[in-house]
């Protein structure tokens, strides 16, 4: 019975380790192997086969409880993880929708800016053309004035009596 008590004490520490396993799956398998080794050693050290059988059955029962507890923990973790993932997917979907909305607004703004740019370019081109035509007309008028001034000046000098 002392052996059984010590074995249960060892098993309880192993059960705690089994319920809260490390991050890697190998540690769980190692812990299960340790418990199975304890079962076989218990059978070897017992003085009577009934005591060994009782200890083995007790350890197998504890092992089964640990596995079920571990399974429940895994199921609980899986459910929590699934819920968290669904929340994250929902959040990401909302962010994508907001991004698409912002992109549509940006595209509309770019279209408006492009339309205004085209209008301004046409207005500037038209004004440059008007200014160019006005400059050309002014140049012609100046040339005409110059020519007429020269002609008038020649007429004036031709009517003047010469001193000679």
Image: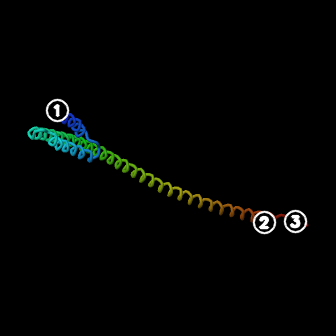
Instruction: Pick the residue in front: 26 or 59.
Output: 59
Residue annotated with mark 2: 154
> Dot 3: within a 10 Å radius of its alpha carbon, few (fewer than 14), some, or many (20 or more) residues?
few
Residue 12 in percent (x, y) is at 21, 35
Please give left or right for residue 151 compared with residue 97 in the image: right
Q: CA distance from mark 3 to mark 1?
A: 157 Å
Q: Secondary structure at mark 1?
A: helix
Q: Residue furthest left?
A: 50
Residue annotated with mark 3: 162
Q: Secondary structure at mark 2?
A: helix
Instruction: Pick the residue in front: 36 or 84.
Output: 36
Please give left or right for residue 110 compared with residue 6 in the image: right
> Dot 1: within a 10 Å radius of its alpha carbon, few (fewer than 14), some, or many (20 or more) residues?
few
Q: Quadrant of residue 63?
A: top left
Residue drawn at point x = 62 percent, y = 62 percent: 136
Q: Indicate the quadrant containing the C terminus: top left, top right, bottom left or bottom right.
A: bottom right
Q: CA distance from mark 2 to mark 1?
A: 145 Å
Please give left or right for residue 160 compared with residue 76 in the image: right
Can you tell which of label 2 and label 1 is closer to the viewer? 1
Instruction: Pick the residue in front: 107 or 95.
Output: 95
């Amino acid at each position: 019975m002392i052996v059984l008590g010590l074995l249960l004490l060892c098993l309880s520490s192993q059960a705690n380790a089994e319920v809260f396993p490390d991050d890697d799956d190998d540690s769980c398998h190692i812990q299960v192997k340790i418990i199975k080794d304890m079962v076989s050693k218990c059978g070897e050290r017992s003085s009577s086969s009934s005591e060994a059988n009782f200890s083995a059955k007790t350890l197998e029962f504890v092992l089964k409880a640990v596995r079920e507890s571990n399974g429940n923990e895994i199921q609980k973790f899986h459910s929590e993880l699934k819920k968290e993932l669904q929340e994250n997917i929902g959040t990401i979907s909302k962010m994508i929708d907001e991004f698409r909305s912002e992109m549509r607004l940006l595209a509309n703004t770019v279209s408006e800016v492009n339309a205004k740019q085209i209008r301004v370019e046409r207005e500037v081109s038209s004004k440059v053309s008007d200014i160019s035509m006005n400059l050309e007309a002014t140049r012609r008028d100046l040339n005409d004035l110059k020519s007429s001034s020269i002609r008038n000046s020649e007429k004036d000098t031709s009517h003047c009596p010469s001193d000679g």
